[in-house]
Image: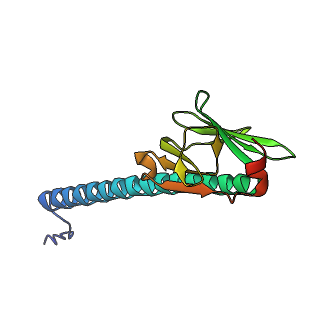
Amino acid sequence: MTKNSHKIKAFTLSEMIIVVLLTVIVAGIAFSVLQLVQKHMYAIQANFSNATSVTLLEQSLWIDANRCNHIKYEEDTSTLYFISEIDTTSYTFEKEYIQKETDTFDVAIADKVFYFKGEETIAAKVDAFKLITAKEFRNTALFIYKRNTANTYMNP
């Protein structure tokens, strides 16, 4: 009786362990790269959101500045008023946001400078102003102005 030993071709235990270790290393590197990419995507999303908020605030300020006859700032309430014959729009500057009546702009303002006739002023009458955003908004400077009409000089 002859034995026909039939050997099945297979990997050895040490070869299988090496394959499993390499797979674990590759999967770990892949998840690390994925985590880094996700962090960058979240940072890009946050920067885009901040830039959009600043742009929306700037557009709103320009529209209101060009629709009104007078701009007035009250330092004690930190409120900027855009006054016209039809209505009055107010912007209240808080520490972390700006509130325009029912709208809220999530923009932190680091500094505010107000001008009248090209001179820096702390008085109520304003014809231009510069807002400098906080660091997380890249210290963006918004300069908003309106052209003075005869109405500006005639009415106190």
| Extreme residue toward the right, this view | 86
Residue 98 image offset from top left, x and y in percent: 60, 39
> In the rendered view, would you say 41 is above or below 73?
below
Is 139 left or right of 12, judged from the image as shown? right
Q: Between 133 and 49, which is closer to the camera in this rendering?
A: 133
Q: Between 126 and 48, which is closer to the camera in this rendering?
A: 126
Q: Between 99 and 126, which is closer to the camera in this rendering?
A: 126
Quarter of the figure with residue 38: bottom left
Which quarter of the rendering shows the C terminus? Answer: top right
Q: Between 121 and 64, which is closer to the camera in this rendering?
A: 121
In percent of the image, x 53 and y 50: which residue is there?
Answer: 119
Which quarter of the rendering shows the N terminus? Answer: bottom left
Is 66 left or right of 78, judged from the image as shown? right
Is 82 left or right of 57, judged from the image as shown? right
Quarter of the figure with residue 147: bottom right
Residue 81 in view (yes/no): yes
